[in-house]
Image: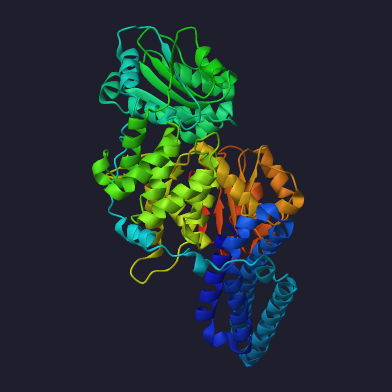
Amino acid sequence: MVDAVVSFALKRLTDFLIQEAAFLGRVRKEVQWLKDELGWMQCYVASAEEKQADDPIVRKWLNDITNIAYDAEDVIDKFILQVHDEETKERKLAGCFPSLSCCSKCREEVNLRDLGKDIEVLKNRINDLPRIRELYQLESSSNRGEGNSSDSLATLRRLRRTTSFSIEENVVGHDDGTTRLLAKLLNQDRRRLVVSIYGMGGLGKTTLAGKLYRHLDVKSKFNCRAWVCVSQDYNTRDLLLRIISSFGFTTKKTEELKQMNEDELERYLHESLQGRSYLLVADDIWKKEAWLSFKRAFPDCNNGSRVIITTRSQEVAENSDERTYVHKLRFLTFDESWQLFCEKASGNPNANGVEEQLKTLGMEMVQKCGGLPLAVIVLGGLLSNKTQLAKWKAVRDHIWQNLKKDSIHIPNLFVLSFNDLNYQLKLCFLYLSLFPEDFEINVDQLIRLWVAEGFVPQDENQNMEDVAKDNFHDLINRSLIQIGKISWGRVTTCRVHDLLRELAIEKARELNLLYISGQMKHSTGNSSVISSCRREALYSPKENCLWLQQSNPSLRTLLSFHSYGHGWEIMRKITDRYTEFRFLRALKLDGYRLDEMALSKEIGKLIHLKNLGLRETATE
């Protein structure tokens, strides 16, 4: 993981040396030294990460390197800000006092001297680090055969932007269940029926519900359909707003709906559904109270309406309604698992797509997946870009070393898949954990955020957004991202499976890469963590007040995901105290009400700001 942070810092230093070559003068050697030293440490990071679990000294060494890499990035951004400020002052002086323009050389020297001092501080910190390499006999990544994978590069080049996707997934192993569930949805019973699909995480509940939801006969019967993801941390008012939006009811403007309280939204939805034959999918319900909190909004008008619930809880499944049909998902058989693996690893639903020499290895690994579809899919995604027997053996050997009860453990398989990513893909994937659980992520917005963060390298043959799209397609191919909506063969929305998201959050927090506010399970309340993390996400209105009390000069990204309340406090703080947020690269305040004065000219002083999200905002 640390290698991703160090690699990103190295990229920034390399770009800085190229872009500012003529300006750096005497401090160029200092910048080059810092780059070389980070490059040296990076060579041994992978080996050190394998040893950190058993030794606190190695763990501290990795933590120190992470902080140095972050601070190196800060030094670059600080210097760019200083140069920008001095150029602005110089233009103003040149307009009023042309004779004073000669002072620019003096200011240039001051900036370079400050840069030199900052690098000297980092140099002293690096020199104070223990020589872990000699002490622990760490192996260089160049000797380990890691890093740039020709297989991976070739695959990435094949995944062009013209790739056409289909949202229809082959729900392997559940043909009989699908038939029974369709019969329950389409029969002539006029009373409302709740269909509950339950089973452990990773069995494919959402995939099966999606297949039913998109079935042509279902579309034909229910012209009024909605899908909502409930998740663990739900808010009833927010759920009602999203359900109304999903149904497409437009008798009231979005802004009017946002002003309604929970009871008013419930009545509005209930009235809108009167006389309609509707279908609702309530995905990923954890507690029966969640369904009960908005159940009253769905009338039973004896016109054949249906509700599909997916849950991990048998209690929720069996007690969701007085008229409930419960369907428990089973594990896949070996033959079904092998079919699914072949689809993901080679794009072919049978063994013809897998070379004979790889087939035996593949079957051994699939057997250890225990019939859990998510494990099979992630394994297939991991091996989809590998064609060499040695690499399949390496994956098999790693799996064998980390078996739990003779089965593949999802976290270990995820770590293996994650470690197979290059540093850009690692950062892009970890960034997804900022989005709420089961959140439907707009792909175009995600692409722009990745570019704004600087995660995407420049390519002489492509613009940066196109490179980012290739990265996105690679993550889909590796089964780390789930396809959401499709439009004309192009993925427009996506999401991350909640099990993979949990693991991504854990890794991102270890790197102090992000802080998720308003999610107690992941919020430590540690002010030192909040004040030094690079990215923050706000999930509820009450977190605004907490955020407004914090100071975080290292902040690169602030994303807010609740669409009610007043956002002008956040914008006002950022513009009034803009010097505290001058490293900010991305700001998302979609759906807020904003004071017109909040968008003051100071927003233009955030010169690193590359993405400002103000969708569906209203001024007052």
Residue in view at x 62 percent, y 77 percent: 34
* Quarter holding residue 24: bottom right
Residue 514 x, y percent position in the rendering: 62, 51
Query: Which coloring applies here?
Result: rainbow
Residue farthest along the left direction in this orientation: 352
**Quadrant location, the C terminus:** top right
Q: Is residue 529 left or right of residue 308?
A: right
Q: Is residue 93 above or below residue 165?
A: below
* 495 lies above or below 136: above
Residue 60 seen: yes
Q: Nearer the viewer, residue 39 or 197?
A: 39
Nearest the camera: 16 or 305? 16
Q: Position of residue 214 (x, y in %)?
A: 32, 28
Q: Is residue 614 visible?
A: no
Residue 562, horizontal then vertical, whole percent:
57, 39
Q: Residue at x 32, y 55 (%)?
A: 159
Location of residue 440 in the rendering, given as x and y in whole percent from the top left corner: 46, 39
Q: Identify the image quadrant of residue 275.
A: top left
- The quarter of the picture where the N terminus appears is bottom right
Residue that appears at 57% across and 41% down: 502
Q: Foreground: 513 or 616?
A: 513
Relative placement, left or right, of 595 versus 384 is right
Label total for image: 0
| 370 to 397, vertically: above or below | above
